[in-house]
Image (cartoon, rainbow, N blue to C red):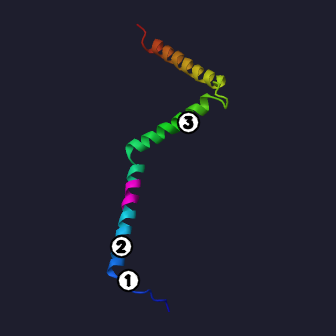
Amino acid sequence: MAAKQPARSMAEIEADLAATRNRMARTVDELAYRVSPQTLKTKALASLRGKANDAAFDAEGNVRLDRLAMVLGGVAGTAIVLGLLRRAFYRG
């Protein structure tokens, strides 16, 4: 058989309910904070800044020239392709 728990007074039950209500209110407040748009935006920006810094700078803080060259080459290639497309389609 299961052990019987001692009977609790009405004051003890009310105190337990109040404590549970307070814990639940704190939990709901924490969840509301975590999913708020401002918090999500802040976390996303911090993550992007970290990734950008890792990609652009080495451990000593120097600019990674190989990555810079790839980015500049991509920008130049895109500009050339767009220029050629413009010339091909908008002959005047």
CA separation, marks 2 and 1?
A: 11 Å
Residue 27 lies in magenta, yes or no? yes
For label 2, the residue is 15
Report the residue that reaches farthest toward the top.
Answer: 92
Instruction: Indicate the position of residue 28 as horizontal and vertical percent values.
Output: 38, 58
Instruction: Indicate the position of residue 55 as horizontal and vertical percent values.
Output: 60, 31
Magenta span: 25-30
Residue 9 lies in magenta, yes or no? no
In the visual, does 53 lie left or right of 31?
A: right
Out of 87 and 53, give the one closest to the viewer.
53
Give the number of the disc on residue 8: 1
CA separation, marks 2 and 3?
A: 47 Å
Categorize mark 1 by other alpha carbons within 10 Å: few (<14), some (14-19), many (20+).
Answer: few
Q: Disc 2 residue type? A: Ala
Residue at position x 63%, y 24% in the image: 63
In this rendering, is residue 42 above or below 62? below
In the visual, does 65 lie left or right of 22?
A: right
Q: Disc 1 residue type? A: Arg
In this rendering, is residue 62 above or below 14? above
Q: Nearer the viewer, mark 2 or mark 3?
A: 2
Going from the N terminus, do you reach mark 3 or mark 1 first? 1
For label 3, the residue is 50
Residue at position x 65%, y 25% in the image: 62
